[in-house]
Image (cartoon, rainbow, N blue to C red):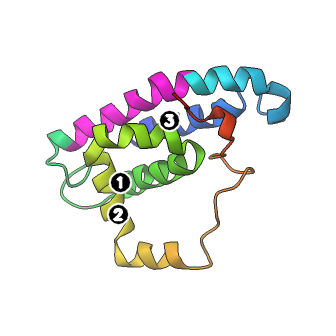
C-alpha cells in the first residue's frame, strides 16, 4: 500500500510536470492541462476506490491491522495534498469515498499530529512542493 501511495504521489507530480521535471510548469502548460484532466477523471477515482476497498475489508478504521501505521499517515498526507492541489476534483470524490476521508479525519485528530498541524512548524503547501495548486488544472466539470 505504501508503494501504491508513492506511485500516486508521482502521478500528482506529473500533472504539473508531464513532459520533464527539468522544465518549468509554464513551459508545459498545455500538456499539464491534458495530464491533469486524465488524473482527475480517471486516476484519482481509481486510487481512492482502491483505498476505500482496503478500508472496507479491514473494518474501516485503519488500512493495516488494528492500529494506525505509517501507511495511514501517508494516506492522510495524500488527502491533505490533494485538497490543496485539486480542491474541486477531490470535493467531488469525497462523498463516494467516506472511509478514506474518515480515516484522514481520525489521523488528523490524533493529539500529537493535531498539535503539529496547528503549530508554526508545519510548512504550508506552495508551488515549490509536490502538491501544487494551479487553478487551471483543477477539474471544473
Q: Secondary structure at mark 3?
A: helix
Numbered-mark total: 3
Q: Which residue is mark 3?
A: 8
| Residue found at x 41% / y 57% | 73
- Where residue 18 appears, as percent x and y from the top left, is 70, 25
Q: Residue furthest front?
A: 141
Labels 2 & 1 near each other (Cβ < 8 A): yes
- Where residue 45 appears, as percent x and y from the top left, is 39, 30
| Residue found at x 24% / y 53% | 62
Q: Which residue is mark 2?
A: 107
- Where residue 127 appears, as percent x and y from the top left, is 73, 50
Q: Which mark is residue 72?
A: 1
Instruction: For the N terminus, give its image quadrant.
Output: top left
Q: Magenta stretch containing residue 51, yes or no?
A: yes
Our reading of the magenta stretch's main secondary structure is helix
Give the magenta part as a residue range. 38-55
Up/down of 9 relative to 128, above or below? above
- Where residue 59 appears, as percent x and y from the top left, is 13, 48
The CA distance from mark 2 to mark 1 is 7 Å
Amino acid at each position: 500500500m505504501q508503494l501504491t501511495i508513492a506511485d500516486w504521489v508521482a502521478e500528482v507530480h506529473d500533472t504539473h510536470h508531464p513532459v520533464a521535471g527539468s522544465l518549468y510548469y509554464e513551459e508545459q502548460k498545455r500538456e499539464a492541462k491534458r495530464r491533469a484532466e486524465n488524473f482527475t477523471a480517471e486516476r484519482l477515482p481509481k486510487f481512492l476506490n482502491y483505498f476505500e476497498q482496503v478500508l472496507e475489508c479491514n473494518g474501516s478504521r485503519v488500512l493495516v491491522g488494528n492500529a494506525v501505521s505509517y501507511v495511514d499517515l501517508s494516506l492522510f498526507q495524500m488527502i491533505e495534498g490533494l485538497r490543496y492541489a485539486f480542491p474541486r476534483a477531490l470535493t467531488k470524490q469525497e462523498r463516494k469515498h467516506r472511509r478514506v476521508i474518515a480515516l484522514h479525519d481520525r489521523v488528523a485528530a490524533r493529539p500529537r499530529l493535531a498539535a503539529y498541524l496547528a503549530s508554526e512548524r508545519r510548512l504550508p503547501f506552495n508551488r515549490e512542493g509536490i502538491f501544487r495548486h494551479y487553478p487551471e488544472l483543477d477539474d471544473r466539470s
